[in-house]
Image (cartoon, rainbow, N blue to C red):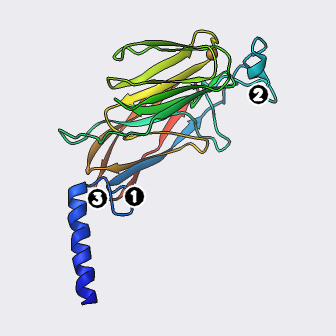
């Protein structure tokens, strides 16, 4: 009887999986394929200019030494930080990504945006936070999305959403000219940003052949075609050269 019980449970689980679809498994991990890789950097590392925050002692006081611009951050292992990697094309026709209820948080802290580069889904809430308590004014300069201009005179949080796919929407502060951030808006969740180890991973993909694009704010875009099936992981590295 015990064995029969297990079989019945297994059948129930398989049935549930069929209902939930390929995106989920019983333990919450994503099914589907993975594309992961490393963003390599070659050439001479550019030196980023220091940001003079003398006019904003609150921000200046948050750094032991003058912070630098973030256009190009080459990691210690020779990889590139802040590269937005995403599925540009190839999802099955009629594919509809499930909505994500969790907001993406963009924090203004130390007169810089955290994160500097990030992704969000169409309709997903962007929670714009002022942790500095001094005036910031954030502007979104999208083309497909209606621009916004939000004054945040003190510590506060403002929510916004984007209505159309757009890679990338620049964000900037009209009070502090050095403050810049970039958000990639997509109709699905298949995106990632390389971090301090230069790697990225896009999980839960249905089988297919995809155009993967890697975007960097100074070095532009690169694309690759990657075919995946089942739950396999494919490696796709990108290399950006100094300009
Ligand atoms: Cu500001």
Q: Tell me the residue that label 3 is attached to.
A: 230
Residue 185, picture quadrant:
top left
Residue 3 locus on image (x, y percent)? 26, 87
Q: Residues within 10 Å of mark 1 (few under 14, many from 20)?
A: few
Asked whether disc 1 touches disc 3, contact meaning CB atoms under 8 Å apart, the reply is no
Is ligand 1 within 8 Å of the beta carbon of the residue shown at mark 1?
Answer: no
**C-alpha separation, residue under disc 3 versus residue under disc 2:** 47 Å
**Total number of numbered labels?**
3
Q: Nearer the viewer, residue 49 or 128?
A: 128
Asked whether disc 3 touches disc 2, contact meaning CB atoms under 8 Å apart, the reply is no
Q: Nearer the viewer, mark 3 or mark 2?
A: 2
Q: Tell me the residue that label 1 is attached to.
A: 29
Q: Answer with the quadrant where ligand 1 appears in the image.
A: top right
Q: Quadrant of the C terminus?
A: top right
Residue 202 locus on image (x, y percent)? 41, 46
Q: Nearer the viewer, residue 167 or 58?
A: 58
Q: Residue furthest left?
A: 93
Residue at position x 26%, y 75% in the image: 9
**C-alpha separation, residue under disc 1 versus residue under disc 2:** 38 Å
Q: Secondary structure at mark 3?
A: loop
Report the disc number at residue 62: 2
Residue at position x 48%, y 19% in the image: 170
Q: Residues within 10 Å of mark 3 (few under 14, many from 20)?
A: some
Q: In the displayed structure, would residue 98 be above or below residue 117? A: below
Nearer the N terminus, badge 1 or badge 2?
A: 1
Q: Secondary structure at mark 2?
A: loop
Q: Quadrant of the N terminus?
A: bottom left
Q: Is residue 43 visible?
A: yes
Nearer the N terminus, badge 1 or badge 3?
A: 1
């Amino acid at each position: 009887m015990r064995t029969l019980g297990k079989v019945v449970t297994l059948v129930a689980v398989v049935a549930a999986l069929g209902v939930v679809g390929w995106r989920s498994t019983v333990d919450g991990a994503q099914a589907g394929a993975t594309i992961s890789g490393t963003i390599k950097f070659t050439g001479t590392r550019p030196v980023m200019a220091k940001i003079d925050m003398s006019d904003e002692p609150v921000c200046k006081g948050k750094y032991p030494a003058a912070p630098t611009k973030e256009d190009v951050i080459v990691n210690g292992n020779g990889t590139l930080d802040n590269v937005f990697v995403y599925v540009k094309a190839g999802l099955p026709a009629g594919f509809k990504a499930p909505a994500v209820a969790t907001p993406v948080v963009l924090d203004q802290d130390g007169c810089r945006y955290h994160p500097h580069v990030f992704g969000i889904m169409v309709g997903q809430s962007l929670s714009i936070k002022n942790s500095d308590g001094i005036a910031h004014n954030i502007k979104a300069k999208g083309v497909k999305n209606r621009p916004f201009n939000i004054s945040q005179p003190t510590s506060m949080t403002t929510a916004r959403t984007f209505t159309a796919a757009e890679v990338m929407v620049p964000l900037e502060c009209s009070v502090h000219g050095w403050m810049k951030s970039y958000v990639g808006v997509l109709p699905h969740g298949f995106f990632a940003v390389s971090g301090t180890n230069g790697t990225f991973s896009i999980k839960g993909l249905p089988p297919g052949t995809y155009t993967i694009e890697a975007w960097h704010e100074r070095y532009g875009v690169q694309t690759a075609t990657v075919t995946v099936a089942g739950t396999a992981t494919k490696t796709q590295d990108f290399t950006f050269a100094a300009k």
